[in-house]
Image (cartoon, helix red, strand yellow):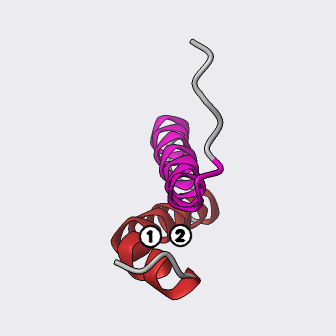
């Protein structure tokens, strides 16, 4: 796959869609008055997927810093 913005977007599109769906689910749970445990679980999932998208994009551009753990 070409290392272009379009190529990176296509490669990461399923992950991006999943992250956006998780963010929407979290917002809907908050607005709908879901139990706190459900809201927290959805928030953790949305945050995790968001960071995975960012890390994927950094990895694809060669900008992902080395792990420090």
Residue visible at 40% across and 76% down in the picture: 13
The secondary structure that dominates the magenta segment is helix
Q: What element carries label 2?
A: helix
Question: In the image shown, does 53 or 38 lie closer to the viewer?
Answer: 53
Residue visible at 51% across and 43% down in the picture: 48
**Toward which corner of the image does residue 28 lie, by quadrant?**
bottom right
Residues packed near mark 2 inside 10 Å, few (<14), some (14 to 19) or many (20 plus): some
**Toward which corner of the image does residue 33 lie, by quadrant?**
bottom right
Q: Name the residue under label 2.
A: 24
Q: Is mark 1 on a helix, strand or loop?
A: helix
Question: In the image shown, does 50 or 65 lie closer to the viewer?
Answer: 65
- Rendering coords of residue 51 (x, y %): 57, 48
- Rendering coords of residue 16 (x, y %): 46, 69
- Do tag 2 and tag 1 residues touch (Cβ < 8 Å)? yes
- Rendering coords of residue 7 (x, y %): 44, 82
Q: Is residue 66 above or below residue 27?
A: above
Which quarter of the rendered picture does the N terminus lie within?
A: bottom left
- Rendering coords of residue 4 (x, y %): 53, 81
Is residue 30 shown left or right of residue 59? Answer: right
**Residue 45 lies in magenta, yes or no?**
yes
Residues packed near mark 1 inside 10 Å, few (<14), some (14 to 19) or many (20 plus): some
Which quarter of the rendered picture does the C terminus lie within?
A: top right
**Residue 49 lies in magenta, yes or no?**
yes
Question: In the image shown, does 53 or 5 lie closer to the viewer?
Answer: 5
* Numbered mark located on residue 21 in the image: 1
Is residue 47 shown left or right of residue 41? Answer: right
Part of the protein shown in magenta: 36-63
Q: Outermost residue, top direction?
A: 69
Disc 2 versus disc 1: distance between alpha carbons?
5 Å
* Numbered mark located on residue 46 in the image: none
């Amino acid at each position: 796959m070409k290392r272009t913005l379009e190529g990176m977007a296509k490669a990461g599109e399923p992950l991006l869609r999943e992250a956006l769906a998780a963010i929407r689910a979290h917002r809907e749970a908050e607005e709908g008055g879901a139990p706190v445990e459900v809201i927290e679980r959805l928030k953790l999932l949305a945050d995790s997927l968001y960071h995975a998208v960012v890390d994927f994009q950094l990895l694809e551009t060669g900008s992902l810093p080395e792990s420090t753990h």
